[in-house]
Image (spheres, rainbow, N blue to C red):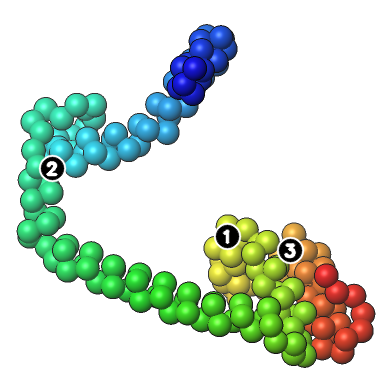
Amino acid sequence: LPAFIIAKQDLEKEKYSKAAIIVLVILIIWFLFPVYWTWNTSLKSQKEIYSMAPTLIPMKASLDSYRKLIFGENFLKSVWNSVVVAVAVTAVSIAVSVFAAYAFARVKFKGRGAWNTSILYAYLIPRSIVATLPVLLMYMAMSKSRIPRCCKGIMRKAGMRFRRSIGAAITGKGWRL
């Protein structure tokens, strides 16, 4: 039997409960509704957007907002500038990364372990923490205490580990990853 017939038979054999299907439909609506609302709003007139009673379907759909965006503003020029910057940054980043990766893989140098460890730690840090770091620094600058109590222990442990790995890599003694 062809693979698609076997897959269809397997799906028919599997039974999903009505509750699971209802939960799935609710989740799909929950996640897709903002996309629908954005698209719906783009088709409304200014008067309808700012009316007190929101509408799920535009009373009078129009593409005027898209026409104003594309032809009235410097939208296409802005998109082109974004594409140029994105391509340039990506190309430079890849070029630098390729040479750095080759150096880390082939060349033996002092501090190589520390660099490898710091790169590994950089990949292990969630991006949400990196995004909140400027807020923490601003808080520290504005507050009387230098570091919030909740962060003192975490920052102290991370600093000790980083200092130990740097020292171990430079001297060739101590612990390493």
Which callout, 1 or 3, points at the residue further toward the start of the chain?
1
Q: Is residue 78 left or right of residue 140?
A: left
- Whole-angstrom CA distance, mark 1 to mark 3, is 17 Å
Q: Which amino acid lies under the numbered mark 1 shown in the image of this protein?
A: Arg
Q: Position of residue 177 (x, y in %)?
A: 83, 70
- Badge 1 is on which residue? 127
Check the image and report above or below for 111 versus 46: below
Label 1 vs 2, first from the N-terminus: 2
Left or right relative to 76: residue 101: right
Q: Is residue 97 shown above or below 155?
A: below
Circle 2 SS class: helix
Q: Nearer the viewer, mark 1 or mark 2?
A: 1
Indicate the quadrant where residue 53 lies: top left
- Mark 2 = which residue? 46
Residue found at x 35% / y 76%? 88
Q: Which residue is mark 3?
A: 151
| Circle 3: residue type | Cys
Expressed as whole percent of the image width and height from the top left, the position of residue 5 reads 46, 17
Q: Amino acid at mark 2?
A: Gln
Q: Earlier in the sequence, mark 2 or mark 3?
A: 2
Q: CA distance from mark 2 to mark 3?
A: 47 Å
Asked which secondary structure carries label 3, the reply is helix
Tell me the crowding category of disc 3: few under 14, some 14 to 19, or many 20 or more residues within 10 angstroms, Cα based.
few
User: Number of labelled discs?
Assistant: 3
Tell me, yes or no, if residue 143 can be seen here.
no
